[in-house]
Image: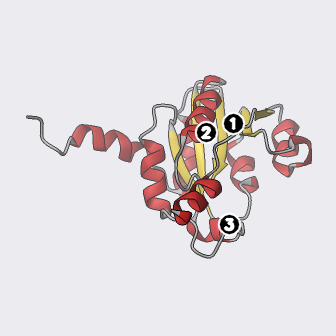
């Protein structure tokens, strides 16, 4: 029977996690085009996985920037959110085949991070109006693209949490 702890696999996961201060250097070594997305990704569900898979298909690498716990709380999803802390959310995100690198941002938006790393493609969910986002203007100013992927109906962390709490 194989040991419960697969150290090489854990090392691969840990290598996908990147402190904010080191992200520019790490991104420089990733294959291009670089796709960037961000979010809380509190309780990972099928909609998230489909979205991240589609985002990765747009380029050679996918950087996922997670809201820190403090940043996520400022989004107004509830005083008890996120349910999973930022380290746990990042570990789960790093385990996905679609992600190349995972980092965090503490600001309300990832605008500063995007301006620093200059991804080739910015991806958001279809519930965003890309024309209204400051991030879109930054990305397009240096020749990148901003794309909204179709929203996957029926999958929402907020709705899932509400359903769990009712039962």
Q: Residue furthest right?
A: 131
The residue that label 3 is drawn on is 77
Secondary structure category for the residue under label 2: helix
* Residue visible at 12% across and 35% down in the picture: 2
x and y, in percent, of residue 62 in the image: 58, 35
x and y, in percent, of residue 157 in the image: 60, 53
Instruction: Give the CA separation, mark 2 to mark 3.
Output: 18 Å
Q: In this view, does 153 lie to the left or right of 161?
A: right
Q: In this view, does 122 lie to the left or right of 59?
A: right
* Residue visible at 86% across and 51% down in the picture: 134
Q: CB of mark 2 within 8 Å of CB of mark 3?
A: no
Q: Which residue lies furthest to the front in this view?
A: 167
Instruction: Give the CA separation, mark 3 to mark 1.
Output: 19 Å
Q: CB of mark 3 within 8 Å of CB of mark 1?
A: no
x and y, in percent, of residue 11 in the image: 30, 43
Secondary structure category for the residue under label 3: loop
The residue that label 1 is drawn on is 152
């Amino acid at each position: 029977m194989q040991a419960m702890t697969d150290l090489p696999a854990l090392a691969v996961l840990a290598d996908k996690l990147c402190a904010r201060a080191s992200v520019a250097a790490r991104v420089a070594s990733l294959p291009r085009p670089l796709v960037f997305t961000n979010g809380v990704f509190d309780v990972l569900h099928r909609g998230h996985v489909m979205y991240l898979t589609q985002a990765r298909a747009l380029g050679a690498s996918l950087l996922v920037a997670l809201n820190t716990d403090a940043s996520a709380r400022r989004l107004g999803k509830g005083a008890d959110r996120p349910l999973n802390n930022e380290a746990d959310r990042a570990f789960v995100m790093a385990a996905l085949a679609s992600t190349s690198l995972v980092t965090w941002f503490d600001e309300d938006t990832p605008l500063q991070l995007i301006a620093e790393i200059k991804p080739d493609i910015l991806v958001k969910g279809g519930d965003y109006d890309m024309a209204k986002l400051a991030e879109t203007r930054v990305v397009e100013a240096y020749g990148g693209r901003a794309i909204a992927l179709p929203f996957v109906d029926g999958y929402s962390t907020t709705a899932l949490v509400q359903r769990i709490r009712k039962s």
